[in-house]
Image (cartoon, coloured by chain):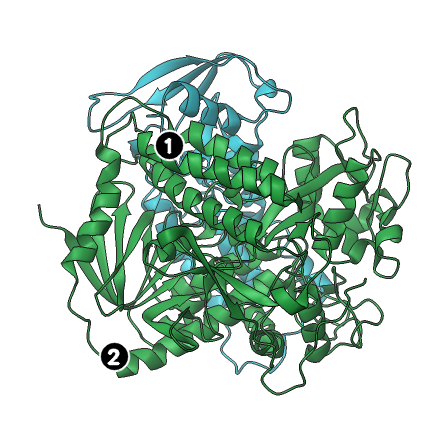
């Protein structure tokens, strides 16, 4: 099977190249991460990429696969068209090979204050939350911060410094929707203005890219509805 | 070139649940904390914990902490230290409520309280009916806890060094730990972090084995750093094999699958756990279920063309329960086995899962080592979580107790560090000799030449561990295993990197991880050969019985001289009566 992998090491390379690798003996069920590991182990130790859990929960190995963002560890190579083009996530500065600088992504995450905020004294036991209220967090809390969505979003490409991006907005929704959280008004107010959230033009690349099947566009829609409800 | 230096009150190495819970305690107390992690914090392996966290909240069935304590002592096959176990089980409810207040999206019962499910080894009333003690956020409890703890650390303004790898501890001649030498992965630049207190929270070493449920990063770095600093490691022969890893792949199928009503069958369709554990059946302790599965396979009742797995049957549990309570493992089974567990059973087999052994600590998280009489704390050094051995898990950990362990002892260590810092206001002078020694270990990988590869040797090491240190062990097998591991240790000197670049050189990180794995493999194999009894996860076919007369004691392994020592189990709890060893039946 033929792979073309984006290679760039700032210490030695003046520009990036797509390097070709051939991998024999593709085993059934082999994931793309397994293929990359075999290439690194058997052919080229200098190939750098992030990865860890190998089962799609840690979010380390987000890469661009044949033009589509995804996680290497849960992408079966049998489903990929040859040659398989592998690039770093788009729109982010490349540190080396498939490793990108995610600091702006994390900055946006932090800036939505992604923590439960309660102003009243805490009870000795758990806050009560009905199963229906808890259900509202499904589809929001499962985010693994891999960055597939945000780096697939054209609005983010245009305004990476000002637009929070789908991942951070999904987190904002996760706390706005949490019946325990008491900072809803501040959270909504913080997303006002033309850029932070309203740059979302429901292009839906985020939902298409999310390897966990989450839908940030829909979450952003829920935030907008809450804003309207609060104003009326 | 001069070495860059940063100074903090406390250096936390590792950003899983243990490290982050400790860091939170410290940041909230306004200590100056640095958390060093080789991956971005939410990528730490706590994220993969599925089933839940134990606490006797009694939200579903009657429960109290004392029953939890009994189950944990019994589960540990009486090797657990009962003072630490009492402390953990008493603290459990408070810690779970605290997590809930921190934002963890626990699943809920109709009355709005936290959902709890039955898990292995749990009982009501000291060995009676099954209990339901495991608090769960669907089957993503670790993810929910890790993200919430990271989020609260953002709020508390904890200082993070993301993607820094800790090379070695630095210490002075009086034995005080002074911090650690680290390397920034992105730039390849070394950074010395000086700290009045250092907390190791680096997780387990599942990568010792070929067939494991663990992340690539679980290479036992902190345990190996402690070994190199002259500290013995405890009970390394006790490695948990989880009964239900996806066969041939290793991904974990949570015990929650059986907690929600799933069960195991052999090739005859027999629910074989009824033979091995008539009372608890599929919810017996993990060591018991893993041995049962391994026995079925050995005796020719395994499934598939090679008869090398059994089936985890969940289709009778119903679509709704699987969608609601087990969505994560359904996705794993679909992705990695091509099977929807709501329709078909999943092939599973015992898979290396959890390091019960580790750096010996007391219940304050202080690292302790033997002196002439008794033991003493290593000044300035703490350890919590899977890298530590406090020991609440003894010879076998109960499901749902690892997430509990990390938050209970993360908090306890944080509290003790706060007290320690009050009495130790200033950094001690740096010990240049110790820094130089650590630098040698780092620069060793600049050596150029032709020889073996990191990946090649790691693969061999894992295969040796799988073949010679698995569920069933004998003197013969372990003796051969020790020889093979010692050969691998020798060959380490002939391993060379091809990649000598500085920027994000993952090959170099993996090389240093391999050094750590080799140290731990030697420790595990030698400790296992010496223990001539069967207890918990350590099952010797040549010594099939537990031998309390000779072996109710903790193993200590020293790197220097590869020497073993032993220390007594703390059988006296804090306030209640001791649970004396009894035959262990489920």
Which one is in front in this view, the residue at disc 2 or the one at disc 1? 1
Position of residue B498 in the picture relative to residue A186 (left or right): left
Q: Is residue A204 visible?
A: no
Side (left or right) of B148 relative to B89: left
Reply above or below: B67 against B487: below
Q: Quadrant of residue B213?
A: top right
Q: Quadrant of residue B535?
A: bottom right
Chain A, hue in figure:
cyan
Q: CA distance from mark 2 to mark 1?
A: 43 Å
Residue in front for this viewpoint, A22 or B140: A22
Decide if residue B33 is in sight here: yes
Indicate the quadrant containing the N terminus of chain B: top left, top right, bottom left or bottom right.
top left
Q: Residues within 10 Å of mark 2 (few under 14, many from 20)?
A: some
x, y (%) of residue A213?
Answer: 61, 39
Q: Residue furthest left?
A: B1
Q: Disc 2 marks which residue?
A: B424
Residue at (38, 55) in percent of width and height: B227
User: Would you place residue A133 above or below residue B298 in this image?
Assistant: below
Q: Is residue B529 above or below residue B413?
A: above
- Residue at the image point whose x is 65% and y is 48% from the top: B241
Residue under circle 1? Answer: B491
Subunit under mark 2: B
Element at label 1: helix
Colour displayed for chain B in the image of the structure? green
Residue shown at 88% from the left, 52% from the top: B274
Depth check: give the residue in front, B290 or B295: B295
Residues at marks 2 and 1 touching, judged by CB atoms closer than 8 Å: no
């Amino acid at each position: 099977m033929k792979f073309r992998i984006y290679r760039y090491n700032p210490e030695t390379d003046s520009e990036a190249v797509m390097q070709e690798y051939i991998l024999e003996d593709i085993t059934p069920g082999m994931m793309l991460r397994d293929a990359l590991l075999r290439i690194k182990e058997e052919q080229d130790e200098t190939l750098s990429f992030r990865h860890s859990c190998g089962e799609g929960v840690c979010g380390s190995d987000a890469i661009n696969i044949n033009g589509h963002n995804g996680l290497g560890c849960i992408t079966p190579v049998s489903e990929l068209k040859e040659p398989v083009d592998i690039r770093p996530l788009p729109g982010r500065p490349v540190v080396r090979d498939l490793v990108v600088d995610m600091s702006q992504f994390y900055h946006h995450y932090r800036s939505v204050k992604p923590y439960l905020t309660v102003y009243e004294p805490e009870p000795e036991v758990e806050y009560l939350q009905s199963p229906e209220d808890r259900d509202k967090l499904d589809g929001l809390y499962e985010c693994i911060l891999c960055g597939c969505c945000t780096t697939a979003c054209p609005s983010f490409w245009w305004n990476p410094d000002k637009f929070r991006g789908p991942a951070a907005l999904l987190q904002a929704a996760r706390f706005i929707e949490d019946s325990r959280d008491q900072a809803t008004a501040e959270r909504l107010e913080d997303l006002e203005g033309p850029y932070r959230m309203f740059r979302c033009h429901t292009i839906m690349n985020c939902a298409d890219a999310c390897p966990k099947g989450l839908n940030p566009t829909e979450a952003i829609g829920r935030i907008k509805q809450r804003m309207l409800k609060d104003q009326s | 070139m001069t070495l860059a230096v940063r100074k903090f009150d406390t250096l936390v190495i590792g950003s899983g649940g243990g490290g982050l819970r400790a860091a939170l305690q410290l940041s909230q107390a306004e200590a100056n904390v640095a958390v060093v992690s080789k991956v971005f914090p939410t990528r730490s392996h706590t994220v993969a914990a599925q089933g839940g966290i134990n606490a006797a909240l009694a939200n579903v069935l009657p429960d109290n902490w004392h029953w939890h304590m009994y189950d944990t002592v019994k589960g540990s096959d009486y090797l657990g230290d009962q003072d630490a176990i009492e402390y953990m089980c008493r603290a459990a409810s408070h810690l779970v409520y605290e997590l809930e207040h921190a934002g963890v999206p626990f699943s809920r019962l109709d009355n709005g309280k936290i959902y709890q499910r039955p898990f292995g080894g749990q009982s009501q009333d000291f060995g009676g009916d099954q209990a339901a003690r495991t608090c769960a956020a669907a089957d993503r409890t670790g993810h929910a806890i890790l993200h919430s703890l990271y989020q609260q650390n953002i709020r508390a303004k904890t200082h993070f060094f993301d993607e820094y790898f800790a090379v070695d501890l630095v210490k002075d001649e009086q034995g005080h730990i002074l911090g650690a030498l680290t390397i920034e992965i992105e730039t390849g630049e070394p950074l010395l972090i000086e700290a009045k207190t250092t907390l190791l929270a680096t997780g387990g070493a599942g990568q010792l084995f070929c067939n494991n449920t663990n992340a690539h990063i679980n290479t036992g770095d902190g345990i190996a750093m402690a070994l190199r600093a002259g500290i013995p490691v405890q009970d390394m022969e006790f490695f948990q094999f989880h009964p239900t890893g996806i066969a041939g792949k290793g991904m974990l199928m949570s015990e929650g699958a059986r907690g929600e009503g799933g069960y195991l069958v052999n090739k005859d369709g027999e629910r074989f756990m009824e033979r091995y554990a008539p009372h608890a059946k599929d919810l017996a302790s993990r060591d018991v279920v893993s041995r049962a599965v391994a026995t079925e396979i050995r005796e020719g009742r395994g499934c598939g063309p090679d008869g090398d797995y059994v089936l985890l049957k969940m289709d009778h549990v119903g679509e709704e329960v699987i969608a609601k309570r087990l969505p994560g493992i359904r996705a794993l089974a679909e992705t990695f086995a091509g099977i929807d567990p709501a329709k078909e059973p999943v092939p599973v087999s015992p898979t290396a899962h959890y390091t019960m052994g580790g750096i010996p600590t007391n219940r304050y998280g202080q690292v302790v080592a033997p002196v002439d009489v008794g033991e003493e704390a290593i000044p300035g050094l703490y350890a919590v979580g899977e890298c530590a051995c406090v020991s609440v898990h003894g010879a076998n950990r109960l499901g749902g107790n690892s997430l509990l362990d990390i938050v209970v002892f993360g908090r306890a260590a944080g509290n003790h560090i706060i007290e320690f810092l009050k009495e130790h206001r200033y950094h001690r002078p740096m010990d240049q000799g110790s820094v130089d020694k650590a630098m040698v270990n780092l620069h060793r990988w600049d050596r150029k030449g032709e020889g073996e590869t990191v990946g090649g040797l790691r693969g061999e090491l894992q295969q040796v561990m799988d073949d010679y240190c698995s569920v069933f062990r004998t003197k013969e097998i372990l003796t051969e295993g020790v020889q093979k591991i010692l050969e691998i240790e020798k060959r380490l000197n002939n391993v060379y990197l091809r990649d000598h670049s500085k920027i994000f050189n993952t090959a170099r990180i993996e090389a240093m991880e391999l050094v750590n794995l080799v140290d731990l493999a030697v420790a595990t194999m030698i400790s296992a050969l010496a223990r001539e009894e069967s207890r918990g996860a350590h099952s010797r076919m040549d010594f099939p019985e537990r031998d309390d007369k000779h072996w109710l004691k903790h193993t200590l392994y020293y790197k220097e001289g590869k020497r073993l020592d032993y220390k007594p189990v703390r059988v006296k709890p804090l306030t209640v009566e001791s649970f004396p060893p009894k035959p262990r039946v489920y």
